[in-house]
Image: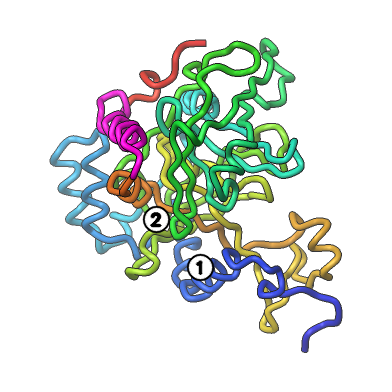
């Protein structure tokens, strides 16, 4: 029986959250199974042989090693071999620092509203459409780079950049993305090229059960990373869900539009919604498993427990952007240049895309 004064997802007034919750509920059994495997360092049995083959093609493994892994897909040994290890080169941290440079805090209405975005190509910022709904909203927003805590190392100033939808704008509600041009020079005179960029690559970057990292500006705070206990769980399997994916990671309001990275710091998804955990009555639960009063949820939404996060797959965003009709010829030319950048050898090298500090 529902408690008085609590809140349900349907009462949030957030159609995106309600739709995401419906998809998560539909896939809940597979999500739980995938999390069980991921927590043991194993790839989920829901992963397909074709995707495993494509993933292994992109890894630096001898051909005979790849064949052995693919042929053994039906047993636990296979899942362990293509699974994960907590042992990483220390360069993982250095590469992560580079990757984080391209992530910005998007400030709207003088900072009263915020989101996260990242440079997806030279001069172009990617975020959610529900963060930047219209060109007019984008024109009134700014992207702040370098908004980070600086307890160690040499302090550096933040740089704020105007968004320029007149030069380029492409958005889609179904894929929940907005791609917008950014001013080439910020308020401190730092060129935008100093922050590098991340390509949207096709399939083959990650497998279900692998770890992910989400670099974000939760509630507009200095840049944070969700790293521990964060796993890529499941891809949408049906035609109406195949653009979505689900993963575990700590996110909050303001994290929308953040890049979700593989352990190789490749963008695998655009973060889109966190789905709260609910009970049989549909009430949103806190981290102790108790129904949350409406007032508490509205004031402290980060106290809610979550089933999973939902993102838009990078490969599906790439396909949509590459083929989207653009009426302005200058916008179409910029889009074609962007796709060419994504297909270039530079797109495969993190260091090649990020100038030395």
343 within the magenta span: yes
Residue 26 or residue 10, whichever sits in front = 10
The residue where tag 1 is placed is 32
| Region in magenta | 327-348
**Number of numbered discs overlaid on the protein picture:** 2
- Residue 51 in the figure: left or right of residue 138: left
Determine whether 190 is above or below 221 in the image: above
Residue with the mark numbered 2: 208
Coordinates of residue 302 in the picture (x, y in percent): 74, 54
Instruction: Tell me, yes or no, whether the two marked residues, 2 and 1, touch with CB atoms within 8 Å.
Output: no
Residue sitting nearer the eye, 305 or 352: 352
Q: Is residue 130 left or right of residue 326?
A: right
In front here: 66 or 331?
A: 331
Q: In this view of the protein, can residue 122 be seen by the observer?
A: yes
Q: Can residue 182 be found in the magenta stretch?
A: no
Place of residue 264 in the rendered image (x, y in percent of width and height, measured from the top left): 40, 35
Instruction: State which tag comes first along the sequence, 2 or 1.
Output: 1
At a point 64% along the width and 28% down the height, the residue shown is 144
């Amino acid at each position: 029986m529902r408690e008085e004064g609590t809140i349900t997802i349907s009462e949030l007034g957030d159609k995106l959250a309600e739709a995401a919750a419906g998809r998560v509920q539909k896939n809940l059994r597979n999500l739980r199974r995938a999390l069980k495997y991921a927590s043991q360092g194993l790839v989920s049995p829901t992963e397909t042989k074709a995707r495993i083959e494509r993933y292994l093609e992109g890894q630096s493994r001898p051909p005979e090693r790849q064949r052995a892994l693919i042929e053994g897909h039906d047993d636990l040994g296979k899942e362990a071999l293509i699974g994960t290890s907590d042992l990483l080169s220390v360069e993982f941290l250095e590469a992560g620092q580079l990757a984080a440079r391209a992530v910005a805090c998007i400030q709207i209405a003088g900072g009263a509203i915020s989101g996260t975005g990242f440079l997806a190509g030279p001069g172009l910022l990617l975020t959610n459409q529900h963060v930047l709904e219209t060109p007019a909203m984008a024109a009134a927003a700014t992207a702040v780079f370098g908004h980070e805590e600086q307890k160690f190392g040499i302090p550096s100033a933040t740089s704020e950049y105007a968004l320029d939808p007149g030069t380029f704008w492409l958005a889609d509600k179904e894929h929940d993305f907005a791609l917008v041009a950014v001013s080439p020079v910020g308020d401190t005179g730092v060129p935008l090229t100093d922050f590098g960029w991340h390509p949207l690559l096709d399939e083959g970057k990650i497998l279900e059960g692998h770890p992910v990292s989400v670099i974000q500006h939760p509630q507009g705070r200095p840049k944070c990373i969700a790293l521990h206990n964060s796993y890529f769980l499941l891809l949408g399997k049906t035609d109406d869900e195949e653009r979505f994916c689900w993963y575990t990671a700590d996110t909050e309001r303001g994290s929308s539009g953040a890049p979700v990275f593989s352990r190789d710091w490749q963008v695998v998804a655009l973060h889109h919604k966190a789905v709260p955990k609910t009970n049989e009555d549909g009430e949103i639960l806190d981290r102790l498993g108790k129904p949350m009063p409406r007032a508490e949820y509205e004031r402290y939404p980060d106290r809610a427990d979550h089933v999973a996060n939902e993102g838009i797959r990078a490969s599906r965003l790439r396909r949509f952007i590459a083929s989207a009709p653009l009426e302005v010829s200058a916008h179409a030319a910029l889009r074609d240049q962007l796709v060419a950048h994504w297909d270039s050898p530079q797109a495969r090298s993190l260091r090649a895309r990020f100038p030395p500090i």
